Image: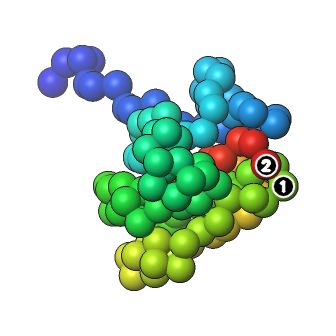
Amino acid sequence: MGHSAGKAPLMVKIDSTAFGKVVVNGNKYEDILIIGNSVIPRDKEKIRAIYGTSHMLSKEEAVKLLKDNPEIVVIGNGQHGALKVDEEAAGVIKKSAELIVARTPEAIKKYNECSRMKRTNALIHVTC
């Protein structure tokens, strides 16, 4: 046995948020999905094309948020709570995981807290 054990994957930590941005592990993003240890920019154009707004959690995104079998899914619904969680999307998540929906500043605290102890995925919306 040598000392060449693989490096543990970097844990995702959300540093801060302000209107229009979120800082994760020192990098600035707009809307994101956090799946396991991956930070994925949210495809707002695609959601806007389907719903006429990006202020909606789609069923397709709900399914993505269940990748890697999370115990908890946190939705940051914006600085003012404008992102709506479609009932069907919420139902998809609740079948497999605990769902926490909160305004983004509160949601990032919840994510950082939960992800230390349980498998946690998130969607973080950064505008209204």
Determine the residue positioned at 71% across, 42% down.
Answer: 126
The front one of 125 and 48 is 48
- Structural crowding at the residue carrying mark 2, measured as other residues with C-alpha within 10 Å and reported as few (<14), some (14–19) or many (≥20): some
Above or below, comparing residue 7 to residue 111 in the picture = above
The front one of 12 and 79 is 79
Figure label count: 2
Q: Position of residue 105 (x, y in %)?
A: 80, 49
- Taking the image as shown, residue 32 lies to the left or right of residue 125, namely left
Determine the residue positioned at 43% across, 44% down.
Answer: 46
Determine the residue positioned at 27% across, 25% down.
Answer: 6
Q: Amino acid at mark 1?
A: His
Query: Badge 2 is on which residue?
Result: 128
Find residue 85 and report its image quarter: bottom right
Q: Secondary structure at mark 1?
A: loop
Per the rendering, the mark at residue 103 is none
Q: Position of residue 31 (x, y in %)?
A: 60, 39
Find residue 32 and report its image quarter: top right
Marks 2/1: CA–CA distance: 5 Å
Answer yes or no: do the residues labelled 2 and 1 have beta carbons within 8 Å? Answer: yes
Above or below, comparing residue 115 to residue 22 in the picture = below
Above or below, comparing residue 4 to residue 15 in the picture = above
Determine the residue positioned at 63% across, 32% down.
Answer: 30
Residue 120 seen in the figure: no
Query: Badge 1 is on which residue?
Result: 80
Q: Position of residue 103 (x, y in %)?
A: 77, 58
Q: Position of residue 44 (x, y in %)?
A: 52, 41
